[in-house]
Amino acid sequence: MRLGESPLGRRVFKVWLRDLIVWSKYWHGSLVGSLGEPVLYFLGIGYGLGSFIPAIEGIPYIQYLAPALIASSVMNSASFETTFSSFTRMEIQKTYQSIAATPVSMEEVIAGEILWAATKACLTGTVMFIAVAFLGFIHSPWAFAAIPVVMMTALLFASIGMTVTSYAPDYDFFTYYFTLFLEPMFLFSGTFFPLSSMPPLLQTFAWFLPLTPSVYVVRSLFQGHVGFHLLGPLLGTIVLTLFFFFFAIRRMVKRLVV
Amino acid sequence: MNPVIISASQIVKKFNGLTAAVDGVSFSIEKGKCFGFLGPNGAGKTTLMRMIYCFSPRSSGTMTVFGRDPLREPRSIKQRIGVAPQEDSLDPDLTVIQNLEMYARYFDIPKTVVQQRAERLLDFFQLKEKVRSKIDKLSGGMKRRLIIARALINEPELLVLDEPTTGLDPQARHAIWAKLEELKSQGVTLVLTTHYMEEAARLCDELVIMDLGKIIEKGSPAELVERHQVKNLEEVFLKLTGKDLRE
């Protein structure tokens, strides 16, 4: 119960800065960790397996895959940060509790953590984006419009991850989340193959996975397919992000401030 | 009489609406004094501390810290409090000096001021040689001293210490007591919880003994020994809380 002062304010960025400073000490390892997997998929599936696959929707497979891998790498990076890393800071290092003993509120601690996780994921996304551009897979200037969409994706999954953490009794909980939720989403959100190749029921189901709209929009922008068909998925992603951002904060405060 | 810094009346704290961890506690703490909360594990001491430093909301009762309500104005109260929690909450990803600098940021203390203060605090707590050390390279006593140093970075008027010397060897404990006495002489109000009677007898001007969420006795250490006609505070404590194990 908070009666007086507004619990969310500028001090969010102090928490964000704390995480940035810590990250800057270990950034090389951290970047290798979050880039390793998408790059391997890109090379292994895109180039390797991709050379046996005919063009999809009129474009070479690797070009089809690249934008989706940017979106999903951001999802993974953001998810990892607000689950395993945030849980460690909360439960083991007691970082949240010690910051909340200062004029920073617990709401700001959680919001700062989510924003940091999103920022870190965007760094991964940016490196991927530059790599993809370098390899010559950007054919439309609209691809740059994918950047804010990727940022939104990062914020969305950072917020969902934090929500999961608010329920987590231990680290095992995250294994379930990654194996039963994120991994299937990585495979069935239209990342590796078009949704249209799945049975209609599964296609409908896939649209309810939070990664699907992001992959769709990012890929469309990369190919310069801009139009009203992007509006629904975009709006859905924004609404979902806002919901989970505030829901995660609420849940975490409820868990911690007792 | 000194001005009152904390006043609490009929404080109740229930978790999940179940049994009361703190059950109708009233007290007031004067400026410049050292006030102790004693009691076996589970007496409600830590819960009360958390309410004072605006972390936990109370279920009912009234409380003011510096004349303000922790539920309404947590930021302005927290700006003037230093908190040394029970658990090791130092940031293991940062060095000793970075721990102080980062904490100072949360209080909006200007950088140049922080440098001077950090230097003075590390000197005061004999951590000067460890300035650039990582936290896991510190001994238990050093970590405790750093936690207290960190709590002083905003030059608080009130220092809340939750079991400041638990788990330390006698040398480390005496070193911390000496520092706390020095702080008191500088006019800092101290609120501490402990289950070391020697600590309470040495530091506290006034104390309460709590059990099962209630205050069961209050007074100065000397008054309590006198009132119960025993040799020391430990005997008062055992007389009041019994000899049964609590965990």
Image (cartoon, coloured by chain):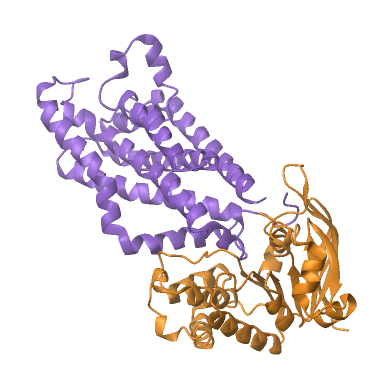
How far across and down, in percent of the image, does residue B82 sit?
Answer: 64, 72
Q: Residue at x 49, y 84 (%)?
A: B122
Determine whether B65 is above or below A138 in the image: below
Location of residue B22 (image quadrant):
bottom right
Near-viewer residue (B118 or B46): B46
Q: Using the rendered image of the protein, determine whether residue B157 is visible from the camera's viewpoint.
A: no
How far across and down, in percent of the image, does residue A67 sit?
Answer: 27, 34
Near-viewer residue (A107 or B88): B88
Image check: B247 left or right of A225?
A: right
Image check: A50 left or right of B78?
A: left
Determine whether A148 is above or below B49 in the image: above
Q: Residue at x 39, y 23 (%)?
A: A229
How far across and down, in percent of the image, does residue A68 sit?
Answer: 29, 32
Chain identifier for the purple-coloured part of the image: A
The quarter in which the C terminus of chain B is drawn is bottom right
How far across and down, in percent of the image, does residue B99 sit?
Answer: 47, 71
The quarter in which the N terminus of chain B is drawn is bottom right
Chain identifier for the orange-coloured part of the image: B
Location of residue A61 (image quadrant):
top left
Residue at the extreme top: A200
Q: Residue at x 34, y 30 (%)?
A: A183
